[in-house]
Amino acid sequence: MADTSGQNDIRGIDIDKLAKGFADLEPNPLKKAILSASTTAREIRWYQKTSGFLDTPDTTGITATGIMHTEGAMPQVMEQSWTRTTSYIKEFMVESPLITDQDIKDTDIDVFGTNVRDITRAVQRKVGLRIYTILTDAAAATPQTPLSNGAVTVQNTAATDGWNVAATGNPIKDLLVGQRKFRQQGYNPIGSYVGMNSLEHEYLIDYLVNVKGSSIPGFSSEQLKKGVVMEMLNMNIMVDEIFTTDYVIQWVKEAVKWKSFSGITAVKIVEPLIGVKFRIREEGEAILENPNGVHVISDTTD
């Protein structure tokens, strides 16, 4: 039947083409907190030096250092050693289905734009998970205890108690243990990073405010651009669901390097008068150059 003024068949409709419904997490918070370099080869050969301070070798009956010795005696010989390691570039690639010209032109939502954005973010997230795997020296993205893939093991310590246990949990002490271990290995913990799940962040703030009566830690808007939620104990606190609950990760920036073979790229593949699809790719690999520059606090939740 014919409509009169104000009825739905003749009134205007304002269509918002941007699909909504889910908030967006930072797809790859770790890239800003590690070193980055480019590579022109798919095979990367690198050398990991032996950690700690050099000292003279022990001999039968003599275990004291030979650096301090008797006047007139010949000095002992000592040297650094290295372990050769080879890594291979990983390819992260996916493509969309063919999106028809008709869907691009008249669909209520921006099908093309939404797919380009979200598929790109999905690739970025997988790159972030790969960096997390290498950072924690885990066989999978979820850290294991002991944290080892058979080559090296990053430093790890069990929490004093679960951070959610008000009576005995002590997040500050656990973080300070990590700082001490960095210093013992010759790394400066000032300006280092701490990565935690939102659950551990909740427990940490609750411990500071309700258990210890501290004020709520502040944050810098400039730091937020780098993925840092707050600064505490001269460390940058990062909170993201990319970090696994029950573990809190501490690291110095030089611990891991991302070697980029090709940056993230999106290309359109056009079928004239039919439609278009797009392909997303990023290539690179993370290298754990300084395993002692990483400390994992395990058992942070009970």
Image: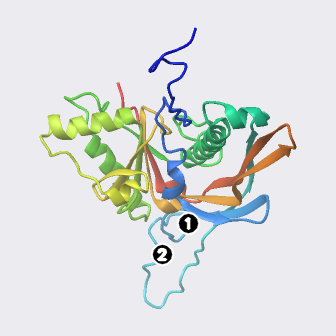
Q: Residues within 10 Å of mark 2 (few under 14, many from 20)?
A: some
Query: Mark 2 sits on what residue?
Result: 66
Query: Mark 1 sits on what residue?
Result: 59
| Residue 50 in which image quadrant | bottom right
The amino acid type found where label 2 is placed reads Gly
Q: Is residue 90 left or right of residue 203?
A: right
Q: Residues within 10 Å of mark 1 (few under 14, many from 20)?
A: few
Q: Is residue 139 left or right of residue 298?
A: right
* Residue 16 in picture, x, y percent from top left: 52, 35
Look at the image and tell me whether residue 140 can be seen: yes
* Residue 74 in picture, x, y percent from top left: 54, 86
For the C terminus, the quadrant is top left
Residue at left offset 62%, top offset 37%:
110
Looking at this rendering, what residue extends furthest in the right direction? Answer: 272
> Label 2's element?
loop
Report the front residue among 1 and 218.
1
> Label 1's element?
loop
- Of the numbered discs 2 and 1, the one sitting upstream in the chain is 1
Looking at this rendering, what residue extends furthest in the left direction? Answer: 213
Residue at left offset 32%, top offset 47%:
175
* Residue 234 in picture, x, y percent from top left: 30, 59
* Residue 242 in picture, x, y percent from top left: 50, 39
Q: CA distance from mark 2 to mark 1?
A: 10 Å
Residue at left offset 73%, top offset 49%:
281
The amino acid type found where label 1 is placed reads Thr
Looking at this rendering, what residue extends furthest in the bottom direction? Answer: 72
